[in-house]
Amino acid sequence: MQELDSRGVSESLESYIRDRLAESDFFAGLSAGRITPWHVREVFGQYYLWRNTFHRWFGVCIAKTASFGDAPNAPLVLGGLVTCLAEEIEGNHHGLALSFLSALGVADPARLAALPVTAAYAESFLHCYFPAGRAGDEAIAALAGRELVVPSRNKIITSALSRHYGITSGLEFFRLHADVEVKHFRALWSALACDGKADSRKLVEAARLEIWEHVTFWDDVYSAVLCPQDK
């Protein structure tokens, strides 16, 4: 396998994702039905608030992409990012998220308030990758890693909510484009691979870090709602 081969890298990262999800307090508890319905609602409410800001992460990647004259792969990178962002906008993700929250029993999502951990996670990508010293390809690799978490994560969510919590409606939010995130990952990674100067070690490291950050976000939110005094 080539160092930046998208299929080989995705298989390696998917194995890492499975391990991280298996180690997660929240996802292990959700899979077993051990988390109370109230805590489930609280955690997913925080996820909804973060998800409403996700488009800003794409903005960082676009802003950090090298100019056309400096990077021959710039059109491929921008094309991949635009495709991902277009699906975010055109796929009615926000409407599906509201339907999901309604199925959970969240009557008024507008009254949800972000916990500090949620606000920190929303800003984490900007703080990490927007500074001038960070390379744009690392931001794109990190975003691609977050995309790759989605299929495995969503499989756990839809299975657990229907089996243990009686949630059978609103799950379209987690079933939408079931495999498209893997395609997003491979398209973005293939674009990065076209840059002969790319440091494969740093790119894989950035992807793994964002995978870790994303799963940790769910665990941190779960911990926060278990201990309200720490809000």
Image: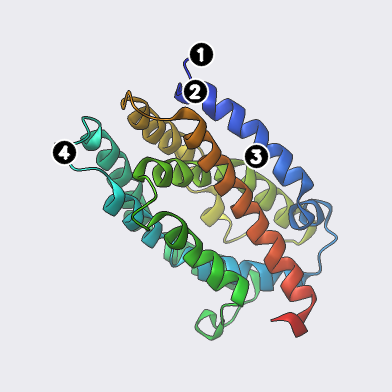
Identified by mark 4, the residue type is Phe
**Nearer the camera: disc 4 or disc 3:** 4
Q: Label for residue 17?
A: 3
Q: Name which quarter of the figure residue 231 lies in.
A: bottom right
SS at mark 2? helix
* Crowding near the residue tagged with mark 4, few <14, some 14–19, many ≥20 C-alpha atoms within 10 Å: few
Give the mark nearest the N terminus, 2 or 1.
Answer: 1
Residue underneath mark 1: 1
Give the mark nearest the N terminus, 1 or 4.
Answer: 1
User: Residue drawn at (49%, 44%), measured in percent from left and top?
Assistant: 147
Residue underneath mark 4: 68
What is the C-alpha distance between the residues marked 2 and 3? 15 Å
- Percent x, y of residue 74: 23, 37
Q: Is residue 46 above or below residue 214?
A: below
Q: Label for residue 214?
A: none
SS at mark 3? helix
The residue lying furthest to the front in this view is: 133
User: Residue drawn at (43%, 66%), measured in percent from left and top?
Assistant: 53
Q: Label for residue 7?
A: 2
The residue lying furthest to the top in this view is: 1
Identified by mark 1, the residue type is Met
- Percent x, y of residue 196: 32, 23
Kindly check if marks 2 and 1 are in contact, taking CB atoms under 8 A apart as contact. Answer: yes
